[in-house]
Image: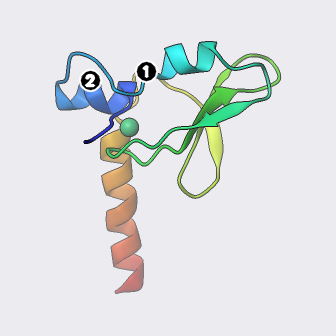
Amino acid sequence: MSSFCSNCARTMGFEEPDIDIEEIASTQLNGYYVDELCEGCGVIGIGKDENGVIIIIEEDGSNAPWDPEEDRELKCRLKNNYNEQEIN
Ligand SMILES: [Zn+2]
């Protein structure tokens, strides 16, 4: 079974995300996150910062405010391609 976040579900044409980022974040207290794994973009955590801004935890451990319009699946593919070029 595959799980895709709100951003990936939209870019892939699915009607309902398996991982509804906004809904999941709404259940978190400020400053906390929950583990979620999206198979499209590799998001591993969803939460809120101290100010209540929705935060995405990335595979590499970095985090950034959630952009609902971002094509995260494309971003992930580009990042992986760049990594391949660096190895070569
Ligand atoms: Zn995703």
Q: Indicate whether 80 appears above or below 75.
A: below
Which kind of residue does numbered mark 2 sit on?
Arg
Tell me the quadrant of the picture where the N terminus can be found. Answer: top left
Q: Nearer the viewer, mark 2 or mark 1?
A: 1
**Residue 35: mark:** none
Q: How is the image coloured?
A: rainbow
For ligand 1, the image quadrant comes to top left
Across and down, in percent, residue 74 comes to 30, 44
Residue at image location 51% in from the left, 16% down from the top: 22
Across and down, in percent, residue 39 comes to 34, 46
- Left or right of 46, for residue 15: left
- Residue at image mark 1: 20
Q: Indicate whether 76 appears above or below 29.
A: below
Across and down, in percent, residue 27 comes to 64, 15
64 and 39: which one is in front? 39
Question: Which circle's residue, 2 or 1, is located before the other in the chain?
Answer: 2
62 and 47: which one is in front? 47
